Amino acid sequence: MKVYTRGGDKGRTSLVGGSRVPKNHPRLEAYGTLDELNSWLGLVISEPDRLPQLAVDTLLGVQNRLFDIGTILATEPESKWQPEPLPADSVTMLEQAIDELDSTVPPHNRFILPGGCPAAARAQVARTVARRAERLLISLGDSIEIAPEIYAYINRLSDYLFVVGRAANYFNGRDEIFWEKSC
């Protein structure tokens, strides 16, 4: 199978089900942003010795879930083939991962600026991409049905990435950068 098909050369692509849509279609914006997020996660875990192992393990699982969600979003309801729904326990598992990782860092009561060590900064960029994906999903949900678990999963993922950033700084002996109100 060749990497290129030439099918998208005129700015259109196929959904699972056969419909051809413009490459700027809201479905593609949503699952394209999830793909971008997945790439950022790959960068976050590209130096696994810079993160607690439990974060690396969780993020590898998250990368698979993001592919699952992208497949769900790319599939039309009338398609003969339908992907499996997001596993019912996905959100709960992510919440447990948040609690477990958060228990490894000191408590905080101030706003934290993105930065610190490179792994923390990458996690914070991924967090903002997750927030953008969430906004795009909400917009897409105005025109197609999206399972509530998908919204919850992406929302929780941004929370998890915030904690990953904190854990990366702590794991690497870097101080967090706190917001200093200037006005």
Image: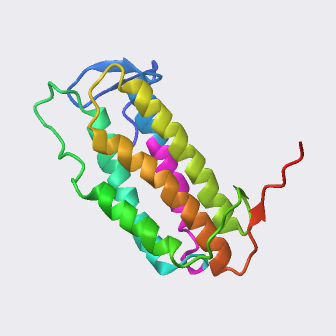
Instruction: Out of 142 and 38, give the one closest to the viewer.
Output: 142
What colour scheme governs how the chains and residues are painted in the rendered image of this protein?
A: rainbow
Residue 45 within the magenta-colored segment of the rendering: yes
Question: Can I make out residue 178 in this image?
Answer: yes
Q: Position of residue 175 (x, y in %)?
A: 76, 73
Q: Position of residue 11 (x, y in %)?
A: 46, 20
Residue at horizontal 68%, vertical 79%? Answer: 172
Instruction: Out of 13 and 87, give the one closest to the viewer.
Output: 87
Q: Position of residue 62 (x, y in %)?
A: 39, 59
Residue at horizontal 22%, vertical 24%? Answer: 18
Q: Could you tell me which quadrant the C terminus lies in?
A: top right
Q: Could you tell me which quadrant the N terminus lies in?
A: top left
Q: Is residue 69 above or below residue 19?
A: below
**Residue 114 appears left or right of 10:** right
**Residue 122 appears left or right of 147:** right
Q: Position of residue 69 (x, y in %)?
A: 32, 44
Per the picture, the main secondary structure of the magenta-coloured stretch is helix
Residue 47 within the magenta-colored segment of the rendering: yes
The residue stretch that appears in magenta: 34-49
Q: Is residue 145 above or below residue 126?
A: above
In the rendered image, which quarter is residue 170 located in?
bottom right
Question: Can I make out residue 7 in this image?
Answer: no
